[in-house]
Amino acid sequence: MNGLLLMCRISNCGRIENRITLEAALLDKVRICFVCLGNIVRSPLAENLFRYHAEERRVSHKYQIDSAGTSNWHIGEPPDPRMSRVAAKRDVNIDGTARQFKISDFIRFDLIIPMDNNNYDTLMALAQTPEARNKIHLLREFDPIPDSGSSVPDPYYGGILGFEEVFDIIDRSTLGLLESLETRMNGDDN
């Protein structure tokens, strides 16, 4: 099992506090799963935006990224076309097929990043060990805008402006997560 981030703690400002071991950083990819309710709007966007930011910084080889939903409502479906259109306007492609989060994902991933408090609570209830619970962190812990809230709102039942707002939140928060991880892997604790 990859011990890279297994026991990390993340402070309120989104900084990973425990040093990532050089050995683990050299041998393994950081495995991250973004989670929302249906895996068709927020979590596939987070997956693809994190990948986009990592590719832009030429560090994508360090990460294995996936997404899932806590519900089974949309298994097998593509991402929501409204979110896909908003992302495409900003030159970001969203792809993937919705799947449901599995208990085995606690072993498969180093970090599990839910979009909101409800999905956080669901994942915490599913986590069977302290190690599994330590992997769960809300995406907005990495939002660089202070006091911006803990949840990424779900735009599913709203208009296009909600999708644009969610894009902005997830864009800056996934970038904040990437920057936090890169800082820790590079040994810069400041």
Image (cartoon, grey):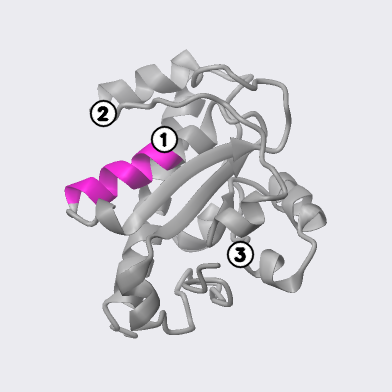
Labelled pair 2, 3 in contact (Cβ < 8 Å): no
Q: Is residue 183 above or below residue 37?
A: below
- Which amino acid lies under the numbered mark 3 shown in the image of this protein? Lys
* Mark 2 / mark 1, whichever is N-terminal: 2
Q: Secondary structure at mark 2?
A: loop
Q: x, y (%) of residue 32?
A: 48, 53
Q: Secondary structure at mark 3?
A: loop
Q: x, y (%) of residue 190?
A: 32, 85
Q: Return the residue at label 1.
A: 167
Left or right for 98, reference 125: left
Q: Return the residue at label 3.
A: 135
Labelled pair 2, 1 in contact (Cβ < 8 Å): yes
Tell me how far mark 2 sits from mark 3, CA to CA. Answer: 31 Å
Q: Is residue 116 above or below residue 190?
A: above
Which residue sits furthest top? 81
Tell me how far mark 2 sits from mark 1, CA to CA. Answer: 10 Å
* Mark 2 / mark 3, whichever is N-terminal: 2
Q: Secondary structure at mark 1?
A: helix
Q: Is residue 58 above or below residue 37?
A: below
Q: Residue at x 45, y 41 (%)?
A: 46
Q: Residue at x 47, y 72 (%)?
A: 4
Tell me how far mark 3 sits from mark 1, CA to CA. Answer: 24 Å
* Mark 3 / mark 1, whichever is N-terminal: 3
53 inside magenta stretch: yes
| Range of magenta residues | 47-56
Numbered tag placed on residue 95 in the rendering? none
